[in-house]
Structures are given as C-alpha cells and as structure tokens.
Amino acid sequence: MTDIVKWNPFRELAGYFNEMDKMFAPFWELMSEGLGHPEFTGQNINLQVHEEGGEIVITGDIPGAVKDNLNVVVHQDRVIVSGETKSTTENNGAKVYQWSKFSRAVGLPARVKSESATVNVQNGALKIRASKE
C-alpha cells in the first residue's frame, strides 16, 4: 500500500524560487563586487562607536569634510553619515579639483534619543554625541 503525502502547494513554488536564485547568482556576485567598492559604500570612512557614561559617542576622520557638506541622521539604533568632500590644489601651475561623495551607516550598541544628538566637525574630525534612552 502506498503512503498518502499531504499536498503542499508551495513546494513547487519554492523549487521555482531556488532555480531563479541559481540563475541570477552570477549576476548578483558581479553586482556586489562593483557596489561593494569603497567609493560606493563609504567603507573608506572609519567610524568608532563607544559609550561614555550616559552617552553614545561616534568619532571618525573625514578628511576635507566641512559641516555644511555633511548630513548626519541619528536614529534610535543607528547613525547615518553622508556628504561630499571637495578640495583644490595647484600642481605645476594647474589647478587640480577633487570631489567625492560618501555614505556610511553604523549600528549603535544602545538606543539613543535622536533629538539630543550633537554634531561637531573640526579639521575633518567628526564627533557625534547622543544621550542613551
């Protein structure tokens, strides 16, 4: 006598999704290599997060950054730093312009009060302070 197997309508659908994943895997690998480049992800921005008493402090160096070209968003559990840097140097009488955009998100070890956050940028050194909830 044969066993009766309960029909699962999603079993076949799951198989289709697995096949699609296999088909697109090379494409996603290629995309992740390109988008994973430091220029696109902001990985060239080194941010350190630590606790000081009742505050979370985020520090980092962003050479060439000024507060006017910087956007800092403090959520309860993460901080997003984005912006652009511009610089002009002279090389053998010719001006050289450099411009770059960056964006970096970092998770926080504790929830913070977003409205209490302060941002300070001096000579490319970034310091963000926010009170813990």
Image: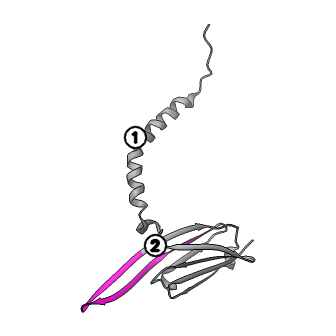
Corner quadrant of residue 39:
bottom left
Q: Are marks 1 and 2 in contact (CB under 8 Å)?
A: no
Q: Position of residue 33 (x, y in %)?
A: 40, 57
Question: Is 13 positioned to the left or the right of 118 in the image?
Answer: left
Secondary structure beneath disc 1? helix
Q: Amino acid at mark 2?
A: Phe
Q: Mark 2 Cα within 10 Å, few/some/many (few <14, many 20+)?
A: some
Write the start and end of the magenta stretch as one range: 79-100
- Quadrant showing the C terminus: bottom right
Secondary structure beneath disc 2? strand
Q: Position of residue 100 (x, y in %)?
A: 40, 76
Q: Position of residue 19 (x, y in %)?
A: 44, 36
Question: Is 78 positioned to the left or the right of 71 in the image?
Answer: right
The residue drawn where x is 37% and y is 79% is 99
The image's mark for residue 102 is: 2
Q: For marks 1 and 2, give the CA distance.
A: 32 Å
- Counting residues from the N terminus, which is met first, the one under dot 1 or under dot 2? 1
The residue most toward the bottom is 93
Q: Is residue 85 above or below residue 19?
A: below
Is 98 in front, or is 59? Answer: 59
Q: Which residue is mark 1?
A: 23
